[in-house]
Amino acid sequence: MPAVMVREATIDDAPLLAPLLGELGYPVAIDALATRLQRMLSRDDQRVLVAERDGATLGLLALHVFPVLAYDRDLAMIMALVVTGSARGLGVGRALVERAEAVGKSLGASRLMVTTHVRRADAHAFYERLGFEFTGRRYVRAIR
């Protein structure tokens, strides 16, 4: 089986990435996603990675790198990770996370962090297999 190739996304990837976000539970129109990609990719601290094999788009990972008061070096945070259902278990997610770690390191980060919804037990097990440690809870509220 050919290797998974991971590359940085471009605005032109919006039609390929929109269905993946839908699988993750965040349906988005292609035009709206192109606008979001434009905003993200115009920044030095954001990366969107795309995993492909044989010309098929299999997954995406959005990464944000930023300074935090708790650490001397920046934190790299996975903001979204999705692998299409038919490609799960084939090393696609691992390839995306490994590339995200390398990108984070190249941007000066010392840690890679991810949050995941409490209902995503498969994702929890995946991250733990990759060496992530469960360290707490996340609370979210809309800005009023």
Image (spheres, rainbow, N blue to C red):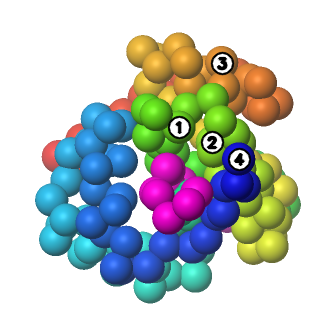
Examine the rendered structure and indicate whether residue 44 appears above or below residue 122.
below
Q: Tell me the residue that label 4 is attached to.
A: 1
Chain part drawn in magenta: 53-67
Which percent across, then down, holds residue 61?
Answer: 53, 54
Label 3 SS: helix
Q: Residues within 10 Å of mark 4 (few under 14, many from 20)?
A: few
View extreme (front): residue: 1
Mark-to-mark CA distance, 3 and 4: 25 Å
Mark-to-mark CA distance, 4 and 1: 12 Å
Q: Amino acid at mark 2?
A: Gly
Q: Nearer the viewer, residue 15 or 47?
A: 15
Mark-to-mark CA distance, 4 and 2: 16 Å
The circle drawn on residue 125 is 3
Which percent across, then down, holds residue 39?
Answer: 35, 77
Q: Amino acid at mark 3?
A: Ala
Q: Tell me the residue that label 2 is attached to.
A: 93
The circle drawn on residue 87 is 1
